[in-house]
Image: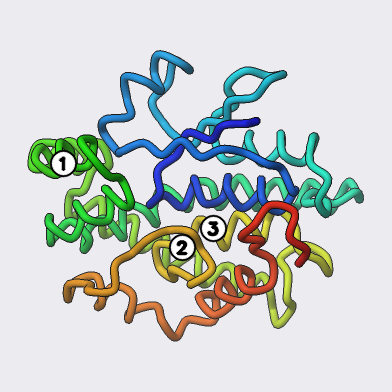
Amino acid sequence: MLKLLQFEMSHFCEKARWTLDYKRIAYEKDTLLPGFHVPRVKRLTGQQSVPVLETPDEGYVFGSDRIAAYAERIGSGPALYPANDALRREALALEERFEAVGHHARRAMFGPLFEDRDFARRCMVGSAQGRQRSFYEKTFFATGRVITMVYALKPDRIAASTQATVEALDFVEQHLAGRDYLVGDRFTIADLTAASLLIPVSFPKAAQVPLPDDRPAPVEQWLARFADHPTVAWTHAMFERHRMLDVGRAE
């Protein structure tokens, strides 16, 4: 059984989960808490980020793009990478583009999220239980400060990332030009990546990224800002059409 080291509230981890489910690959989730994950992940992989996939043949595969490529190689589900060389290059270029956008979208959303530290804590702790949850909640004041430093949650950086996110939304709208998919006429890694890594402005119901309903005003205002953007509607459509919530379930 493969094991995915992950955060619950991570659009990069959701991309990894989606690719594994879409390719009908069984795996076990090993959910970590942001900040507390560093010693373990660094010991296993030499780096500090999740998602990380523990595999029997390639050791630890880290990064949502590498996990997606691995899933494509071993999975039995529909192909995510076009067979046509030109379309494949286009899909890979868009995947790379939105991997970068994902970092901006996260910082931009974390700005309003961390205006209410209690709400941020509940988002980060997710479904964790027992001693791990209790200790995390008690120490979140310090952990939250580390998170704000790691992700550079400063007004100028947040503003720049917000602008980059808006530009990404506009790019998708213009690139689609009325079509359903970004590359060719079918769902590819480009669509999966863009929809996943724009979760911070959309939070589709089918996305397995928790965001409590009792959202503080800054978070509600953030989501309302983008609610009517055509690309947000498109991300919801991608999740509704193509997100397989259970391994092996047909679309």
**Identity of the residue drawn at 26% across and 30% down:** 36
Compared with 219, 68 (above or below) is above
- The residue to which callout 3 is attached is 196
Q: Amino acid at mark 3?
A: Ser
> Would you say the residues marked 3 and 2 are in contact, meaning their CB atoms lie under 8 Å apart?
yes
The numbered dot on residue 134 is 1
Q: Residues within 10 Å of mark 2 (few under 14, many from 20)?
A: many
Q: Secondary structure at mark 3?
A: helix
Q: Amino acid at mark 1?
A: Ser
| Mark before the other along the chain sequence, 1 or 3 | 1
Compared with 185, 39 (above or below) is above
| Residue 243 located left or right of residue 135 | right
Q: CA distance from mark 2 to mark 1?
A: 28 Å
Compared with 149, 180 (above or below) is below
Q: CA distance from mark 1 to mark 3?
A: 30 Å
The numbered dot on residue 154 is none
Q: Amino acid at mark 2?
A: Ile
